[in-house]
Image (tube, rainbow, N blue to C red):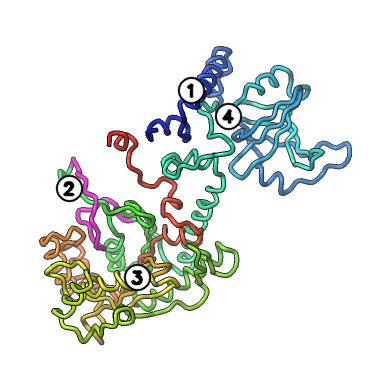
Amino acid sequence: MSEKQKNQTGGQPQRPAEEKDYNELVAVRREKLKTLQEEGRDPFLQTKFPQDAYADEVKAHFQDPAEGEPGRTVAMAGRMMSKRVMGKASFADLRDTTGTIQMYIKRDDVGTEAYQAFKKFDIGDIVGVKGHVFRTKMGEISVHASEITLLAKSLLPLPEKWHGLRDQELRYRQRYLDLIVNPEVKDTFLKRSRIIREIRRYLDERGFLEVETPILQVQAGGASARPFITHHNTLDIDMYLRIALELYLKRLIVGGIDRVYELGRNFRNEGMDHSHNPEFTMMEIYEAYTDYEGMMNLCEDLMRTVAQKVLGGRAVVSFGGQEIDLESPFRRVSMRQMVEEKTGLAWDALRLEDAKAEAQKRGLEFEPWHSKGELLNLFFEEYCEQDLIQPTFLLGHPVEISPLSKKDPQNPGYTERFELFIAGHEYANAFSELNDPLDQRSRFEYQEMLKQQGDEEASGVDEDFLTALEYGMPPTGGIGIGIDRFVMLLTGQQSIRDVLLFPTMKPVKEKDEE
C-alpha cells in the first residue's frame, strides 16, 4: 500500500476488507457531523471551554471527601480515548495535556438528551466535562459528570487500540497522530524543553547574553558544510541559509559584548541518517579573554550540570546499551595520539608522500591536493572516531581543517581546538578563536582555493568579517554544541528524528511517483 493511502487511513496499512470497513467508519463520522450541523449543534462553532483542572494534578491532589460531602468540582477538557456504554451509565477516558482521567457519565445526572448525544460520541472526539471528583468502588479517581460537551469532532478513526501506530516513518510524518496514540513520546519533548531551559539558565547565571543573528546570509561561513541556496527577489541576489552561528557572534565580541551565546537553527544541505537532519539546533558560545581550555572547562561543567538537573541525580545515562559517565572528568587526547594508538603510525615522522602512501595502502579515499593535516583527519575518522564512547575531548587539529582557530604556539602546524566525542559522535567543537586578520585572510583564501577545486563544503573569503577583525578582537574562546545530539543522549534516543518534533521527510507524492 502506498504512503499516500497510509496517510489517508490514519496511519494503519489496510487490507482490502479492512479498507472498506475503514471507509465506512469515516463515512459514519461525517454523517454524524452533518446531523449535528443540521440540528444547530455544530461542535466546530464552540469557541472556548472553561477548563480549570488537569488530569495529573486532580489525581495527585485528590482527597476523599467527608461522608455526605461532594468532591471537588472541576471543568476538564481533552480527547476521549475510550468509551464503555452500559445502559443508563457509561465510563470514558479523557486525555488532556498532562495525562488521562476516567469520566463517569450517568443519564439521570446529565439529562436524557445529553446522554443520548454522548452515546454517539466517537473515540478521538474532543470533549469538555464538568462535575465533581470522586473515587469509584474499584478505587479509580474519576470525574462524575454533571455536563458533557462535544467541542470538536474527530472525522478520522485513531489507529486501533492493540496495534497502535507502529510505522516508524509515519510516526515522524504525522507527529500529531504519534503524540495522540503514543503519549510516552511527549515525555521526550518535555525533557528536550527542560534541557534547553537549563542550558539557558546556566549561561544566563554566568553573565552570558543571548542574542539572535541572521539566518539568511550573503555568504555561508563559520563551518565546512554544503549550504542551502535561495534567492532574494527584491535585492536580486542569491542568499544562503546559515550553516553556523559563528561569524556574526564574533562580530559582537569585536563590538564589546564579551560573553554572548545563541541557540538557533542551522541548515546544511547534506546527507540524512540517524544522527543528521538538514536543519538542526546548534548553540554557540563566545567569551572574550579566555581560550579553548576555558571553553573545555565550561563545556564539561555545563553538560554535567544540565544532566544532573534534568536527570534528577548523577550525570550517568544509558545510551545505545552503554553507560555514559558525564560525572567523571572527561578524557583529553590529541588527534595524533589517537591515530598513533590505532594505526601504529608515528605521524610527526611521516612526510606527505609517506602519509599518502599509507592512506592508499589502507584504501582511504583522498584528493590530490590534500595536505598531511587533512590526511590525519581522514585516518582519525576511519580508525578512531567510532571508538570514543566515554566523553573525550579530542585536541590538536591540523591547521588545514581549522580555518577559524588559533595556531598552537608550540606546534604551528596544529591549532588550539577541540571536539567533544561521546558514543562515537561529535557533540561539540571549540577553538581559541583566530583574531589575527592577516592570518584569517590566508585561511579564507585557502578555503577559497578548495572551493574552486570543487570542494562544496569549503567556505570563501568573508570580507566584512575580516574588516571586523581589523578593528581588533580580544583573545576569545568559542564553542558550538549540537543540541539535538545532547537531547538524544539525555533521553536515550538512538535517532535524531525521535528528538525533533517535525524531522525533514521526503514528500509522500514524490515517493508514490518513484
Q: Nearer the viewer, residue 187 or 390?
A: 390
| Callout in the foreground (1, 2) | 1
Task: State how far apart marks 4 and 2 are (Cα).
Answer: 47 Å
Residue type beneath disc 3: Glu
Q: Which residue is mark 3?
A: 385
Image spot of residue 164 (x, y percent): 54, 39
Task: State how far apart marks 3 and 1 are (Cα).
Answer: 52 Å
Residue type beneath disc 1: Lys
Q: Which residue is mark 4?
A: 125
Q: Residues within 10 Å of mark 1 (few under 14, many from 20)?
A: few
Task: State how far apart marks 4 and 3 are (Cα).
Answer: 50 Å
Image spot of residue 268 (x, y percent): 28, 54
Secondary structure category for the residue under label 4: loop
Secondary structure category for the residue under label 2: strand
CB under 8 Å between callouts 4 and 3? no
- Return the disc, 2 or 3, that comes first in the chain's sequence: 2
Q: Which residue is mark 1?
A: 20
Residue at horizontal 27 percent and vertical 76 percent from the top = 397
Q: Nearer the viewer, residue 36 or 205?
A: 36
CB under 8 Å between callouts 4 and 1? no
- Return the disc, 4 or 2, that comes first in the chain's sequence: 4
Magenta stretch holds residue 194:
no
Residue at horizontal 15 percent and vertical 63 percent from the top = 461
Q: Which residue is mark 2?
A: 238
| Callout in the foreground (4, 3) | 3
Question: Which range is magenta?
Answer: 213-234
Residue 108 appearing in the image: yes
Quick check: 367 left or right of 390? left
Magenta stretch holds residue 218:
yes
Res. 245 image quadrant = bottom left
Secondary structure category for the residue under label 1: helix
- On screen, 96 above or below 87? below
